[in-house]
């Protein structure tokens, strides 16, 4: 049996990974995280979000195997129990739980830059509507699919749906001071007015890049890997 581990020497990066995994579990208690080694000695940590989007955060380290999937709850436990060293046990392989390929690393064109405050404000308004009109199954699909922001640039023009906005804020990818909560209750003034979220697009994907991570949504319906 091949050894399965993620070696993350920097304790700050291990804390970043723990935060990413914790938020993935908050969105889905059965979440899995897929790791893929990059050529620059960094690793992309990927997860689904429950909003038909993918989320990714890049962590400095080395993963073995170089493309593998682990259960988020096992990762969280092994991170918290790590006493010494920097190798995090990935537990049993969950590769069968991740179907299809990941989005490409390249091929995305810059479309627009959006103030982070605008996106958090949209998420707050959406959360209020979801609370008013949602159910035990979560926000209504009509709200999630609503395009709440129009972006244009680089020969592209399209709407950004509430799904992407919710995913970005739920994963905590926008830096702010004070409270941890990214939607209801967060004073927008705690977010730097100059903090921007970059919108990129490829033929198949829309991508929002914030300081602490990115979310991606297929330009079709639902998650597709093409």
Image (spheres, rainbow, N blue to C red):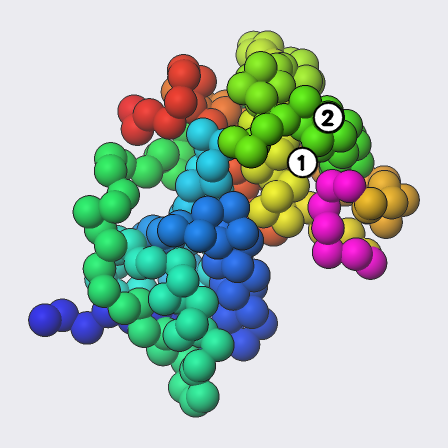
- Residue name at image x 59 percent, y 28 percent: 135
Look at 87% across and 45% down and name the residue there.
187
Q: How far, Cα to Cα, is label 1 from label 2? A: 28 Å
In this rendering, position of residue 223 left or right of residue 184? left
- Is 67 one of the magenta-colored residues? no
Image check: 212 left or right of 54? Answer: right
Residue 148 x/y as whole percent: 68, 18
Please tell me how crowded label 2 is: few (under 14), some (14-19), or many (20+) other residues with Cα within 10 Å. few
Q: Position of residue 182 (x, y in %)?
A: 72, 46
Q: Chief secondary structure of the magenta span?
A: loop
**First to last magenta residue range:** 178-184
Who comes first in sequence, dot 1 or dot 2? 2
- Callout in the foreground (1, 2): 2
Residue 168 placement, left or right of 203 = right
Q: Residue at x 56, y 33 (%)?
A: 136
Residue 19 visible in the snapshot: yes
Task: Write down the residue under mark 2.
Answer: 132
């Amino acid at each position: 049996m091949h050894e399965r581990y993620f070696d993350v020497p920097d304790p700050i990066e291990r804390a970043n990974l723990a935060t990413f995994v914790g938020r993935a579990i908050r969105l889905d208690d059965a979440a899995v995280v897929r790791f893929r080694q990059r050529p620059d000695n960094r690793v992309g940590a990927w997860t689904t979000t429950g909003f038909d989007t993918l989320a990714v955060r890049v962590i400095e380290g080395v993963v073995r195997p170089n493309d593998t999937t682990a259960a988020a709850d096992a990762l969280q436990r092994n991170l918290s129990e790590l006493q010494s060293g920097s190798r995090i046990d990935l537990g049993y392989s969950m590769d069968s739980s991740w179907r299809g390929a990941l989005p490409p690393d390249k091929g995305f064109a810059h479309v627009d830059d959006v103030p982070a405050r605008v996106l958090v404000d949209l998420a707050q308004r959406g959360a209020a509507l979801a609370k008013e009109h949602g159910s035990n199954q979560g926000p209504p699909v009509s709200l999630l699919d609503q395009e709440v922001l129009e972006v244009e640039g680089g020969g592209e023009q399209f709407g950004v749906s509430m799904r992407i906005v919710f995913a970005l804020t739920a994963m905590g990818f926008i830096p702010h001071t004070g409270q941890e909560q990214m939607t209801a209750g967060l004073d927008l003034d705690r977010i730097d007015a100059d903090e921007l979220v970059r919108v990129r697009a490829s033929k198949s994907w829309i991508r929002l890049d914030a300081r602490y991570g990115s979310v991606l949504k297929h330009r079709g319906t639902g998650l597709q890997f093409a």
